[in-house]
Amino acid sequence: MPVEEFMAGWISGALGLVLGHPFDTVKVRLQTQTSYRGIMDCTVKIYRHESLLGFFKGMSFPIASIPVVNSVLFGVYSNTLLALTATSHQERRAQPPSYTHVFIAGCTGGVLQSYCLAPFDLIKVRLQNQTESRVQPGSPRPRYQGPVHCAATIFREEGPRGLFRGAWALMLRDTPTLGIYFVTYEGLCRQYTPDGQTPSSATVLVAGGFAGIASWVTATPFDVIKSRMQMDGLGRRAYQGLLDCTVSSFRQEGLGVFFRGLTINSARAFPVNAVTFLSYEYFLHSRG
Ligand SMILES: CN(C)C(=N)NCCC[C@H](N)C(=O)O
């Protein structure tokens, strides 16, 4: 099994994550809280009340989990393609796999990564939603003191299954959209690269960026439901399940609710995934 694919997934994921985390915090707040009027209002309020650090809340756990999550995604994707087409990453430029195979491999990577991602993503979302300022002395102490305290509190208050709250929505979000992610990336690389050659860095950047946008645009409705389900464990439960969350959100806020965070998700997706794919390809080629 090619271990490099897992290593490349790890490094590229970490780079993309740091770059995109401030956008992610604004997105999560917009999706789960009603006190912000839009991207600008949310950004200004976070900066005023919580300083620049407010944008990086909840980042340490995703950084720690990225070796697992991204290497599972890219490693499973590549190894599924190897099983389906009997070609390694290097051989695939000369013998490109069909888009159906790419889609199946992407979906397989998506299912498995969502399972690993679920508890880390839950903790990230809970921490990102804490609006207390760490820099102002005398401000109230947040409910969770950090990622480990957050995990332990969820475990104690909501049970071990509580750590997987929102996991079904996460799986529904990631399975088809990661198929779309890899198909878009492959499609654009092939379109702009002469047959049999390796795509240039510019092509990889653009294809990675648009793959990120295509996947996040389609992922946003389930992303909203996922974030709401994850916040639902706090205090009185508002939703009976995934379907109830979808229907109640629609009834109370209209169709627009499923597109909350769409602009910021897309703005974040381009740089994050451009960097992710560039470092992924760079790592694999420098070793191949
Ligand atoms: C639409 N979805 C779920 C994705 N495209 N997932 C792949 C993750 C890529 C990168 N870490 C990111 O956060 O954009």
Image (tube, rainbow, N blue to C red):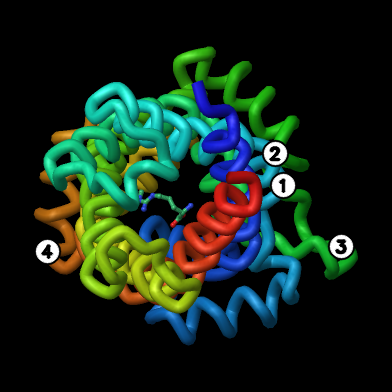
Residue sitting at x 50%, y 21%: 1
Crowding at mark 3 (Cα within 10 Å: few <14, some 14-19, many 20+) = few
Q: Which residue is mark 1?
A: 60
User: Picture coordinates of residue 147 (x, y %)?
Assistant: 70, 38
4 vs 3, front mark: 4
Q: Which residue is mark 3?
A: 138
1 vs 2, front mark: 2
> In this orientation, does residue 106 appear?
yes
Q: Counting residues from the N terminus, which is met first, the one under dot 1 or under dot 3?
A: 1
Quadrant of the frame with the C terminus = top right
Could you tell me which secondary element the residue under label 4 belongs to? loop
Measured in 3D between alpha carbons, the distance from the residue under mark 4 to the one under mark 2, in whole angstroms, is: 37 Å
Residue type marked 2: Ala
Q: Which residue is mark 4?
A: 254
Measured in 3D between alpha carbons, the distance from the residue under mark 1 to the one under mark 3, in whole angstroms, is: 25 Å
- Residues 69 and 120: in front is 69
Residue 141 falls left or right of residue 66? right
